[in-house]
Amino acid sequence: MSWKLEGSYFETCSCDVVCPCTASLALGATHERCRVTLVFNVKDGQVDGTDVSGLTVAAVADTPKVMSEGNWRLGVFIDAAASDEQAEKLGGVFSGALGGPMAALGPLVGETLGVKRAPIEVQESGLRHSIRIGDAIDFEIEDVVPFGVETGEPARLTGIFHPAGSELTVAHATRSRIDAFGIQYDGKAAFSTSHFAWAA
């Protein structure tokens, strides 16, 4: 079985800007726990011959202060626009069952909170990105352009271990309401990337 996914990625978490966990899962979060929403907006992709382009998947996690210690609680949203076949294929990728980056994170997950289907809206406009998932999640993040950078290019974190890739753009939440799978928080820190690419 082979698959590939490409698209954009957004996250917001309960840490203060900039999230220590993204620099390394072995660093402690700002607060006693890390609560994070990971959104994968698949613009082009197929899983075992099934086209999954134009669909979005999001994971919501609640983890101990030091994420590398494991015992994560994790729930997944799959785009309501997906057919049953598409949802099944995407579920295989995002559960880690089909290999890839999520398989690498699998050993850290101690409790699976389930998979839900929900309408997912993603809007991308320059430095601003907003995500709405049913009535459970509504957040907007803005990429951070450092003071004095005349090019307008946002700050980036490089050389990291992260499912979306080794380079992410630093952002911050301008609006945040997360209440899903029993996990509630107001996001502050955020990251984005205009392009993630997975294949297995």
Image (cartoon, grey):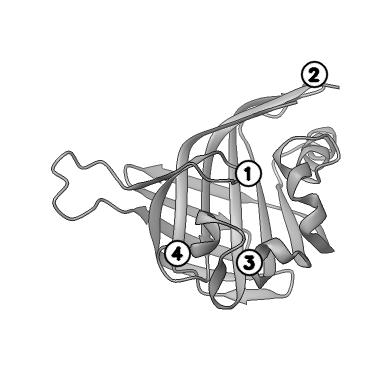
**Chain-order first, disc 3 or disc 1:** 3
**Chain-order first, disc 1 or disc 2:** 2
Q: CA distance from mark 4 to mark 1?
A: 17 Å
The residue pinned by badge 1 equals: 163
Instruction: Tell which of 41 and 167 is nearer to you.
Output: 167
Q: Residue at x 60, y 43 (%)?
A: 40
Q: CA distance from mark 3 to mark 4?
A: 19 Å
Instruction: Tell which of 193 and 31 is nearer to you.
Output: 31
x, y percentage for residue 133? Answer: 61, 57
Label of residue 11 in the image = none
Dots 1, 2 in contact, CB < 8 A: no
Q: Secondary structure at mark 3?
A: loop
x, y percentage for residue 159? Answer: 49, 41
The residue pinned by badge 3 equals: 136
**Chain-order first, disc 2 or disc 4:** 2
**Chain-order first, disc 4 or disc 1:** 1
Q: Residue at x 75, y 62 (%)?
A: 74
Q: Secondary structure at mark 1?
A: loop
Q: Amino acid at mark 2?
A: Gly
Q: Residue furthest bottom?
A: 32
The residue pinned by badge 2 equals: 49
Q: Amino acid at mark 3?
A: Ala
Q: Residue furthest front?
A: 26
Count of marks overlaid on the render: 4
Q: Secondary structure at mark 4?
A: strand
Instruction: Tell which of 29 and 122 is nearer to you.
Output: 29
The residue pinned by badge 4 equals: 189
Quarter location, residue 94: top right
Which quarter of the rendering shows the N terminus?
top right
